[in-house]
């Protein structure tokens, strides 16, 4: 009876373990993109964090915060500069529009209708809203707006759209917060997590430690390679667009070519769409200007811009350069296919999850699978040390000094 009671107790604990595991897996699956991007931020900021810790920055929370902010600072400055340029150009555009409107009003309108077109452009918003309600009367008498069915429908639609945008922005900010929080706690407490993992699931032969060590090393190369690829892509974009402006027709140059190239490099960190968020709007602007401004019909430069953006700035760095800077210890072709099929299979986060699965699978096949297939005990001497030891792996950098087998997070026990 005692043995039966023990088995029932173990079965109950295993059932609880399976239930908790299924719930945790469901949570991870629901937010897999957020978790993966958080791990990317962790590996991107870990070298900065460790350098600060070696220089005596205390406490660890301060070092982790500064490391994350240091990574984000260049992108924040670039974004602030881009916004400042945009506001400056908007101010110039409005001043020119007002000047053209004033000149058109003073001259009674030009013969070609330019002044009338400028005046009409200023009043476009009012013209669109006039069929629904009178703006001035609505401000003076809000009850009239609510009593008008068309005006009430317009307000309802605007409120519904605003609510949708607020929900979208709030959800996005929540995901960003979770990403930063994951990176922060991995930086600060990753060594505790790795120590618990090695103690709980490790073996006395060091195979798990060897596997985790090589996985951590290649994760570091892959995620740092994304940062390096963004820097190189931004450099290529800035040079390419600046050279294009040399041959641009008069009045048809790329506005702020170097800034557009740097923004394209920064946007390359966004999977799938990436830099298309930058050069698609610029291409649309160039086509619109070529179609509306003198000389009309100069479309060869926008077409050339799109071709250079797609081939030189987008495809070549993403499919050729990124595998070389990321997969230093893996086959370049396999890394390239991981970057291609990852987004196709998993969505936007696949550009990070695809290489991660490649690393986990390749090193499992190298270190563990042959021994399992041969039905032999997995011994540490059967592991080729060259698989997880390189000349560049230093204890201070990998965080594995005096820790057999390293750690999944690559953090030493501080």
Image (cartoon, rainbow, N blue to C red):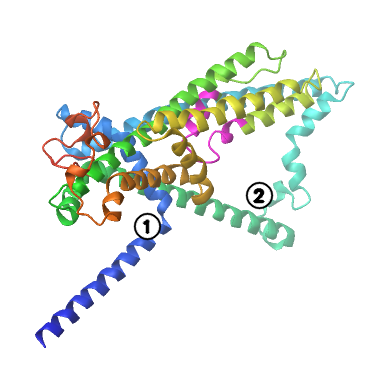
217 left or right, relative to 131 = left
Percent coordinates x, y for residue 58 in the rendering: 15, 34
Q: Residues within 10 Å of mark 1 (few under 14, many from 20)?
A: some
How many numbered circles does the render carry? 2
Percent coordinates x, y for residue 319 in the rendering: 52, 33
The reply to whether residue 181 is in sight is: no
Residue at image mark 2:
139
| Residue 273 covered by magenta stretch | yes
The reply to whether residue 385 is in sight is: yes
User: Which residue lies most toward the front here?
Assistant: 374
User: Which residue lies most toward the top here?
Assistant: 246
Of 380 and 174, which appears nearest the observer?
Answer: 380
On residue 148, which mark appears? none
Q: Which residues are magenta?
A: 261-279
Q: Residues within 10 Å of mark 2 (few under 14, many from 20)?
A: few
Residue at image mark 1:
28
Percent coordinates x, y for residue 285 in the rendering: 68, 29
Q: Residue at x 35, y 31 (%)?
A: 71
Q: Residue at x 17, y 42 (%)?
A: 381
Q: Secondary structure at mark 2?
A: helix
Q: Quadrant of residue 283?
A: top right
């Amino acid at each position: 009876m005692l043995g039966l009671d023990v088995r029932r107790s173990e079965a109950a604990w295993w059932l609880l373990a399976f239930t908790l595991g299924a719930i945790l897996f469901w949570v991870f699956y629901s937010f897999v993109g957020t978790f993966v991007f958080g791990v990317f931020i962790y590996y991107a900021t870990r070298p900065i964090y460790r350098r600060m810790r070696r220089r005596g920055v205390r406490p660890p929370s301060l070092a982790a915060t500064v490391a994350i902010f240091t990574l984000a600072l260049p992108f924040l400055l670039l974004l602030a500069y881009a916004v400042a340029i945009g506001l400056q150009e908007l101010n110039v555009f409005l001043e020119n529009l007002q000047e053209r409107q004033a000149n058109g009003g003073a001259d009674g309108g030009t013969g070609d209708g330019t002044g009338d077109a400028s005046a009409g452009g200023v009043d476009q918003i009012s013209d669109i809203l006039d069929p629904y309600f009178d703006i001035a009367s609505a401000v003076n008498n809000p009850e009239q707006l609510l009593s008008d069915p068309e005006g009430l429908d317009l307000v309802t639609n605007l409120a519904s759209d605003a609510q949708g945008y607020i929900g979208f922005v709030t959800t996005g900010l929540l995901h960003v917060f979770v990403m930063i929080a994951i990176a922060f706690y991995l930086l600060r407490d990753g060594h505790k997590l790795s120590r618990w993992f090695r103690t709980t699931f490790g073996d006395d032969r060091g195979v798990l430690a060897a596997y985790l060590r090589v996985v951590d090393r290649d994760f570091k190369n892959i995620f740092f390679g994304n940062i390096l690829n963004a820097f190189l892509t931004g450099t290529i974009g800035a040079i390419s667009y600046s050279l294009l402006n040399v041959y641009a027709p008069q009045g048809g140059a790329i506005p702020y070519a170097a800034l557009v190239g740097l923004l394209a490099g920064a946007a390359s960190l966004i999977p799938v769409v990436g830099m298309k968020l930058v050069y698609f709007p610029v291409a649309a602007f160039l086509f619109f200007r070529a179609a509306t401004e003198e000389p009309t019909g100069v479309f060869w430069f926008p077409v050339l811009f799109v071709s250079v953006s797609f081939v030189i700035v987008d495809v070549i760095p993403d499919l050729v350069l990124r595998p070389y800077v990321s997969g230093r210890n893996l086959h370049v072709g396999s890394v390239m296919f991981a970057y291609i099929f990852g987004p196709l299979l998993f969505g936007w986060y696949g550009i990070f999850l695809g290489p991660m699965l490649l690393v986990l699978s390749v090193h499992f096949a190298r270190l563990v699978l042959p021994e399992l297939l041969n039905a032999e005990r997995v011994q540490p001497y059967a592991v080729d040390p060259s698989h997880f030891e390189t000349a560049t792996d230093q204890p201070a950098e990998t965080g594995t000094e005096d820790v057999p087998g390293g750690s999944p997070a690559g953090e030493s026990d501080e």
